Amino acid sequence: MSLRVFGLNLLKNNRSLLQNALRNNGAPGAQVLAVAPYTTQVTVQATPAAVQKQKVSKAMKAYLERANEHDEFMKTQDLEFQIGKRHLANMMGADAETFTQEDINEAIAYLFPSGLFDKRARPAMRTPEEVFPARKAAEFDETGRPFHSMFYTGKPNFFQLLHDIVKETNYLYDLEERMLRRGNKPDENQKLETAGFQLLSKDQLERVLVEHIVDIEYQSFTNAMERLMSSPYSYKSKAFIERFLKPLIDQSKQLEVPKPKIDEQGRQYITTYECLRKTARADVTVRLPGTGKITINGQDITYFSMDECREQLLFPLSYSEMLGKVDVEANVEGGGPSGQAGAIRWGIAMSLRSFVDQEMIESMRLAGLLTRDYRRRERKKFGQEGARRKYTWKKR
Amino acid sequence: MAYVPATTLNILRFSKLSRLMSMYPSHFAEPNLNKITDRKSASHIPVKAATNDLSDSIFYGELKNKLIKYITKKGNRNLAKELLNETFETIKRTQIERLNLNKGDKTSVIINSEQLLINAIENSRPLLQLSAIKRGGVKYQVPVPVTEKKSYFLAMKWLLDAAREKDRKVHLPEKLAWEILDAACGQGRVVKKKDDLHRQCESNRAYAHYRWS
């Protein structure tokens, strides 16, 4: 409703606003792309209102044809999607009206179970807006004259972005010089925090710009952004910079530390199941307080005959200064000695998290004790002697 | 330039070239045992799993691990480790003997065999290498600087080669111990080999420009 009211105001030939409003009107259910001021939906209505009666250029005509085609296509796709959704809901015995995308995903996974490893390769059903990428609206008026001065570069949004970045940078340089002359210093408290952030990746930037860019262009984008961010006054253009940053996952808070349980002797204990390394598999229980007793499959540490494996077992304990303070029990099967020792090492490190402070957990993570070692034996290749080695080659 | 083990560095290291078949993406850092790293910037960096030769025990040495890998034949690392331990034992025995025979100052004799190994490797590291470059149908021996990593490799390889070149009756640890002791004092076959190479590079300095022209 609000859109229609909005539309009435817009008859005062405000081109860009009209475009905006009609774009939203044309695709009410379209997915909202993150930070996408450049995205525009192709619709016939997206063209200026004056087009319909005035003389139309060839470019505009071709565009209208294409837009019409696309509209029709999207409409049929949407219809098919709705019908498919209804069928799915009926098959699953649910109400078609309240069938959400999550329900669809569940139903597809149930009805078409797939053993394919890559999730993107498995069967899926998504809204056509998500499947077919967004397209730009008309970039020129009815006489064929482009709106944007950089239209003929082929990538107006991208080059506009570069211009914007440089404009911001120059502004900051000016500011720095003025402040220097006045003897002011940049505010340390407001300093821009970029430690936990990363610039948008190339395909994310492409999605934001609705334009294809090549590697070297992406590099010039990153270079320009880095120059902008390295300025001491970069907090002044924080809003601009943050449009192109995405937060990184905090590695130190990724895994939840389990609460220790109490056994019949009143000791705290934690059991970590499924400790895997190579083909070995272990269950590790760590008990606090203890005397440093280690039990592996009913034997003590002499279960491993090699020094290296014994050293591996003691590594997390001594690193976290818990050697002699906890008891370790492990059941391990499969694999060889070094794989088994690695599995138990990981189990001990993971269990110890419940008994040490946050600082120690972080340093254990940085020592690589909390990372699962996913490396496996590399397969032999045909036509080769082993994984990498080639057969001896003789010319004749 | 003294030897600095990478585990004592206070920064997170990344492997320079991400290996083609590596399980880890290139933004994974190498594990770091140093407990005073800058936490704030590191909290977002994922870390590779510690390999099974890494540990925080006092017996851990980075160069030692590398040397074990070079001694290893047919994947028998256990044997290689035993051989190196035996080498260290021989070194220590001879050094203690020397210490007891030495009537003067007792501080001049180093007994720490791991320190002696580091000294030996440092003394036998080459700076330059000759590489054959073909210009105008003629092969020239052109002196080329060696990277730090390769220089450590060459030093250890030369030590081992010298140790392996021996009578059948002599055990490898014994010979290796003698080579290490010689090289640590700046003499012996390995250091001579390095000096020879440097001398050759010096005499071929006229060809140095073929490296880039």
Image: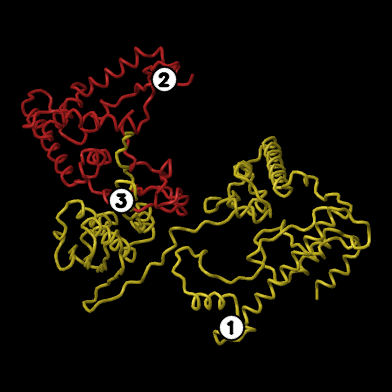
Chain colours: A yellow, B red
Give whichever of A263, B21 is nearer the camera: B21
Quadrant for residue A227, please give it: top right
Question: Label 3, label 1: how many angstroms apart (C-alpha)?
Answer: 51 Å
Question: Label 2, label 1: how many angstroms apart (C-alpha)?
Answer: 74 Å
Q: In the rendered view, does B15 fall on the left or right side of A64?
A: left
**Placement of the N terminus of chain B among the 4 image quadrants:** top left
The x, y position of residue A51, in whole percent, is: 89, 60
Chain ID, mark 2: B
Residue type pointed to by label 3: Thr
Binning the other alpha carbons within 10 Å of mark 1 as few (below 14), some (14 to 19) or many (20 upward) gives many
The x, y position of residue B102, in whole percent, is: 8, 25
Above or below — where is A184 with respect to B196? below
The residue to which callout 1 is attached is A89
Label 2 vs 3, first from the N-terminus:
3
The residue to which callout 3 is attached is B51
Contact, mark 2 vs mark 1 (Cβ under 8 Å) = no
Above or below — where is A270 with respect to A302? below
Chain ID, mark 1: A
| Mark toward the viewer: 2 or 3 | 2
Q: Secondary structure at mark 3?
A: loop
Binning the other alpha carbons within 10 Å of mark 2 as few (below 14), some (14 to 19) or many (20 upward) gives few
Residue type pointed to by label 1: Ala
- Residue drawn at (31%, 54%), measured in percent from left and top? A377
Contact, mark 2 vs mark 3 (Cβ under 8 Å) = no
The residue to which callout 2 is attached is B134
The x, y position of residue B111, in whole percent, is: 15, 33
Image mark count: 3
Q: Secondary structure at mark 2?
A: strand
Residue under disc 2 on the same chain as residue under disc 3: yes
Task: Find the residue positioned furthest to the right.
Answer: A54
Quadrant for residue A257, please give it: bottom left
Chain ID, mark 3: B
